[in-house]
Amino acid sequence: MTRQRLFVWAQYCSVFTGMKPQRFSNDINIRNRQAGFQYELLDKYVAGMVLTGTEIKSIREGKVNLQDGYCYMNDGEMFVKGINITPYAQGTHYNHEATRERKLLLKRSELKKLEGKVDEKGLTLVPTRLFINDRGLAKLEFALGKGKKLHDKRDSIKERDAKRELNRLKLK
C-alpha cells in the first residue's frame, strides 16, 4: 500500500468508525542527551523500576524528563531521584508525585559491583535512557560517569562540529 492510501485509510478509520489513534505507545525510547555531554560515560547498566499504575501510563504517553536525574545507593538498594514523570491527566486522587524517588531493580551482584565503583572519587550514576522492553516493562538504562571539565566539553563540541562538517562534505 502506498503512503497516500495508508493516510486515507487512517482518516476513514477515525472519521467513519470512531476509532481513535492510540494514546499509549509501546515503542517508548526517552534519552538524556545532556548526560553524554556533561559526563564521560564508562559503563552502562539496565535496571527495572518500581512504578505505580499512573506512572507507567505517563511513561507510555512519553511524558518523562531525565535531565536532573541521578542514582544513589542506600542500605544495599539503588534508587533514582530527580526523574520527572508528569502526573497522569486522567488520574484521580491516587495519582503519583512527579519527582519522587523510585527503586531500581538489580541483581545483588550488580549492586555490590556498582557500590564499589561509586565509592571511587568523581564517579556517579547518571540515567541515560528510559524505554519499554518487548515484554511491556519499563527499564532504565544508566551509566557510570565521570564529570567532564570545561575544556573536555569544548573538545566534545569541536569533535562534533568536525564530524558534522565531514558529513556535509560527503553529501555534496
Image (cartoon, rainbow, N blue to C red):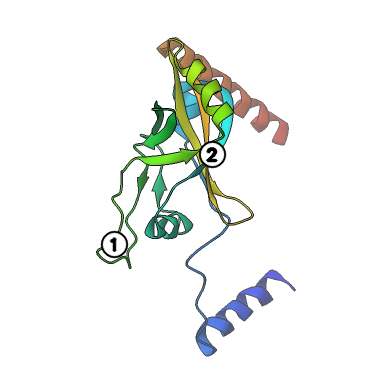
Measured Cα–Cα span from mark 2 to mark 1? 25 Å
Position of residue 106 measured from the top left corner of the image (x, y, whole percent): 54, 36
Residue 27 figure quarter: bottom right
Number of numbered tags placed on the structure image: 2
Q: Is residue 92 visible to the viewer in this orientation of the structure?
A: yes
Which residue reaches farthest left?
A: 93
Position of residue 152 measured from the top left corner of the image (x, y, whole percent): 48, 13
Give the quadrant of the C terminus.
Answer: top right
Residue beneath the point at 34% across and 53% down: 86
* Near-viewer residue (98 or 30): 98
Give the quadrant of the N terminus.
Answer: bottom right
* Near-viewer residue (28 or 167): 28
Q: Residues within 10 Å of mark 2 (few under 14, many from 20)?
A: some
Position of residue 76 measured from the top left corner of the image (x, y, whole percent): 44, 28
Q: Secondary structure at mark 1?
A: loop
Position of residue 158 measured from the top left corner of the image (x, y, whole percent): 53, 18
Residue beneath the point at 33% across and 68% down: 90
Above-or-below relation of 70 to 40? below
* Near-viewer residue (110 or 6): 110
Check disc 1 and report the residue beneath it: 94
Residue beneath the point at 46% across and 11% down: 120
Which residue reaches farthest bottom?
A: 16
Q: Secondary structure at mark 2?
A: strand
Q: Residues within 10 Å of mark 1 (few under 14, many from 20)?
A: few
First along the sequence among labels 2 and 1? 2
Residue type, numbered disc 2:
Ala
Residue beneath the point at 44% across and 32% down: 78
Identify the disc placed on residue 47.
2
